[in-house]
């Protein structure tokens, strides 16, 4: 068994530092643009910058040997119309993986992150939806879907609290039912628990970490929310629990 090295520590902490620096650097322009642009234009600019920034960030992680990525399956979701993108949520990097390949989705995120000095200004400019008020969250999400946007929503509502997935919450079913849109499951696999629910930042992972994203089943708009939650939960457990071991070593395509 190979243990983390000093180089692993340098690369992993460099990756975290660069992410923070990128977010802080974007904060002043994001605040200015948010004050000057009308909402729709602001959202378009904010999402485009996040897409480009996340893509560049993953490219950096690949170049320094911290990670390897196979995210190309997400490219098939471009220009397919409004839908809910519903990935499992093993780590903090999951939204970065998805949004690095797709520039248009609205993202439902923890309300506290909208006040975060690294992420808040950019997320507000992009029009991302906080999850603190369930009724308001559903209204905003349905409006975005009816306007033609896709919605990135982690059905667990937080990082996975168990293997292979934590409990599925009902919000994905309620939004899909009201907006009458399909739910596209996304399967995220990694060979490390880095930045997962129980990962302490002082811990150093063994590098490179391999990430693979696969497209799962696409569900039709649900008729019965409770039945849909149970069906979605069962599907994720089968699709993720049935994988044999760690994902194979993918090509390094950030």
Image (tube, grey):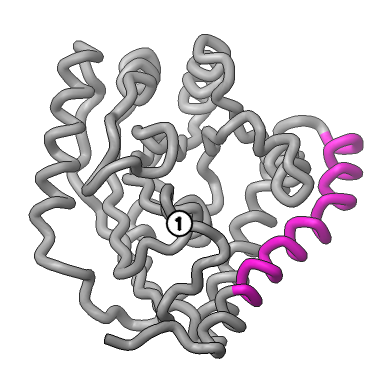
Q: Callout 1: helix, strand or loop?
A: loop
Give the percent coordinates (x, y) of residue 241: 13, 51
Percent position of residue 227, x then y:
15, 17
List the residue tagged with mark 1.
Answer: 199
The answer to whether 42 is drawn above or below residue 229 in the figure is below
Q: Main secondary structure of the magenta part?
A: helix
Q: Residue drawn 45% across and 56% down?
A: 199
Q: Which residues are magenta?
A: 13-37
Q: Quadrant of the N terminus?
A: bottom left
Residue 41 seen anywhere in this rendered image of the structure: no
Can residue 19 be found in the magenta stretch? yes
Image coords of residue 251 (percent x, y): 33, 82
Q: Quadrant of residue 16?
A: bottom right
Judged left or right of residue 215, residue 209 is right
In reply to whether residue 85 is colored magenta, the answer given is no
**Which of the 4 image quadrants contains residue 82?**
top left
Q: Residue at x 75, y 30 (%)?
A: 39
Image check: 153 left or right of 227?
A: right
Q: Which of the pair 248/6 is nearer the observer?
A: 6
């Amino acid at each position: 068994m190979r243990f983390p090295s000093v180089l692993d520590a340098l690369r992993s902490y460099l990756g975290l530092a660069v992410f923070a620096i990128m977010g802080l650097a974007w904060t002043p322009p994001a605040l200015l643009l948010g004050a000057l642009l009308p909402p729709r234009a602001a959202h378009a600019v904010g999402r485009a910058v996040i897409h480009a920034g996340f893509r560049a960030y993953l490219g950096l992680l690949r170049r320094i040997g911290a990670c390897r990525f196979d995210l190309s399956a997400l490219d098939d979701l471009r220009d397919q119309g409004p839908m809910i993108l519903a990935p499992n949520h093993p780590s903090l990097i999951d939204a970065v993986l998805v949004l690095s390949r797709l520039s248009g989705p609205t993202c439902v995120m923890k309300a506290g992150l909208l006040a975060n000095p690294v992420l808040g200004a950019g997320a507000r400019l992009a029009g991302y939806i906080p999850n603190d008020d369930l009724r308001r969250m559903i209204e905003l999400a349905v409006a975005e879907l009816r306007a033609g946007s896709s919605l990135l929503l982690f059905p667990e509502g937080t990082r996975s609290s168990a293997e292979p997935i934590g409990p599925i919450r009902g919000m994905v079913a309620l939004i899909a039912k009201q907006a009458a849109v399909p739910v596209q499951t996304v399967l995220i696999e990694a060979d490390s628990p880095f930045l997962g629910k129980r990962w302490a930042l002082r811990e150093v992972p063994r590098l490179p970490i391999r990430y693979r994203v696969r497209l799962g089943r696409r569900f039709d708009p649900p008729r019965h929310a409770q039945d849909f939650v149970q069906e979605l939960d069962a599907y994720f457990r089968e699709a993720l629990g049935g994988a044999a071991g760690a994902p194979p070593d993918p090509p390094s395509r950030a």
